[in-house]
Image (cartoon, rainbow, N blue to C red):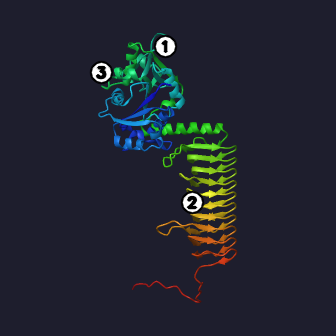
Amino acid sequence: MTALDIIIMAAGKGTRMKSRIPKVLQRLAGRPLLHHVLGQAASLQARRVVVVTGHGATEVEAACAGLAGAGGTFDLKFVRQEPQLGTGHAVQQATPALAGDGTVVVLSGDVPLTQAATLRALVEAGAGERLALLTVRLPDPTGYGRIVRGEGGTVQRIVEHKDANDAERAIDEVYSGIMAVPAQRLAGWLARLTNDNAQGEYYLTDIVSMAVADGVPVAAHCIGDALQVAGVNSPAQLAELERAHQRAQAAALMEQGIRLADPARFDLRDDARSGARGEILCAQDVEIDVGCIFTGRVELGEGARIGAYCHISNATIAAGAVVHPFTHIDGEKTGAHVGEGALIGPFARLRPGAQLGREVHIGNFVEVKNSTLADGAKANHLAYLGDASVGERVNYGAGSITANYDGANKHRTVIEADVHIGSNCVLVAPVTIGAGGTVGGGSTITKDTPPGGLSVARGRQVSIANWKRPAKQVKG
């Protein structure tokens, strides 16, 4: 394949978004629109990517420069378009940063869902010699540039909606804003652009008629999936595209056998913190109830069931596990693991480093962070386990916590197998609770306890007979 350089147009203000955030940094499926487009560039194995910025340029460039993986896949450059005088003017700013050979692919920073296979097919249609346009047929083409064909169906030109006559506006094949251009031809065509049109702008689409005049073939790669070329100009359009994208992801998962209670109430998003792409890997007979949000990479074992309104990020849920409603599992970069047959929630929280064995029970309002719970361990109510190693069959009482932070450093708590921790206990780390031991309710444990013993650390109960409560004095 010919060498590829990519221009991404990302200079627009996006006035209709009514936001201080630049349009190309608005989020779809958890990731900025422009990051989706940079991902397309990576999938094409581009040699260089030039992002044309303008409105909010500093913010946009900072968001792109820190994108995980971008620097290792292609050479990333930025150019400014100030003022913004149209798409042709934008590409004029970018061409000095290109090598001048191979093929140039022009993408839009607010068109996030074009598939890699579609872009590869477009490049192949150009074959390094032709001008190739990505087109789509729309039932309502209002606002789009129309593809005007001549005899034999050959592309002759693109006419913008505002400049089109009634016959041209009746054409339903439209230009997507994406093209592949022979680099050696591009600079000459750009130099011939004028702004003699209804908007007073330099249209990149005018190079189509120039190519025809120069005898350069123009190929139109027409697709039927409008979602791939849909752009974002308003919050309503962003919401529509989000839901269409999520519905497509839900359909793909159901084709794999996942049972979704309602595909319209399902979200799979990228995780901007860890850089993990949204992905669910499922075995057979997985069930997901309504309102669930998945981010990053999630694995669901055979027969796993996810209750309503759970948020699961970067985690593995093993076979037969049940995650009850309103549970939050967030593995971030280190991941979280729920073992086979475990019961989690409702209203539980598993944080990074939570590693739960088989048949573990984590109940309502229990939080687990950077802790391992061996097979059969249970913490059923209102508890905190942080930086802890919990043995098999431990029963961890309601209201108990590991005090793992001394104000400067974190310390670890070890609870050995078959320990029973009573309610409302504080285990002050570093501390080890010996195997088979019992800690009486309300105890604050600061020293290691022996195996098999009862440890109680609380004040002696005192009862005063015939005691009367103080009475409130009545002012005269």
Question: Which picture quadrant has residue 236?
Answer: top left
Task: Answer few, some or many: residues within 10 Å of disc 2's Cα (few below 14, many 20 plus, some between 14 and 19).
Answer: many
- Helix, strand or loop at disc 1? helix
Whole-percent x, y for residue 337 in the image: 62, 54
Residue 470 visible? The answer is: yes
Tally of numbered tags: 3
Residue 344 image offset from top left, x and y in percent? 64, 57
Is residue 151 found left or right of 365 in the rendered image? left
Report the quarter where the C terminus lies: bottom left
Quick one: label 1 or label 2, which is nearer the N terminus?
1
Residue depicted at 58% across the width and 88% down the height: 464
The three-letter amino acid code for the residue at tag 3 is Asp
Sequence order check, earlier mark of 3 and 2:
3
- For the residues marked 3 and 2, what is the alpha-carbon distance in whole angstroms? 64 Å
In this orientation, does residue 365 appear?
Answer: no
* Circle 3 or circle 2, nearest the eye: 2
| Secondary structure state at the residue bearing disc 2 | loop
Expressed as whole percent of the image width and height from the top left, the position of residue 221 reads 50, 22
- Which residue was labeled with disc 2? 370
Q: Nearer the viewer, mark 1 or mark 2?
A: 2
The label shown at residue 313 is none
Cα–Cα span, label 1 and label 3: 27 Å
Residue at x 36% of width, y 28% of height: 95
Query: For mark 3, does the 10 Å Cα neighbourhood hold few (<14), some (14 to 19), or many (20 or more) residues?
Result: few
Q: Earlier in the sequence, mark 1 or mark 3?
A: 1
Q: Mark 1 highlights which residue? A: 153
Label of residue 196 in the image: 3
Secondary structure under tag 3 reads: loop
Q: Which image quadrant for residue 418?
A: bottom right
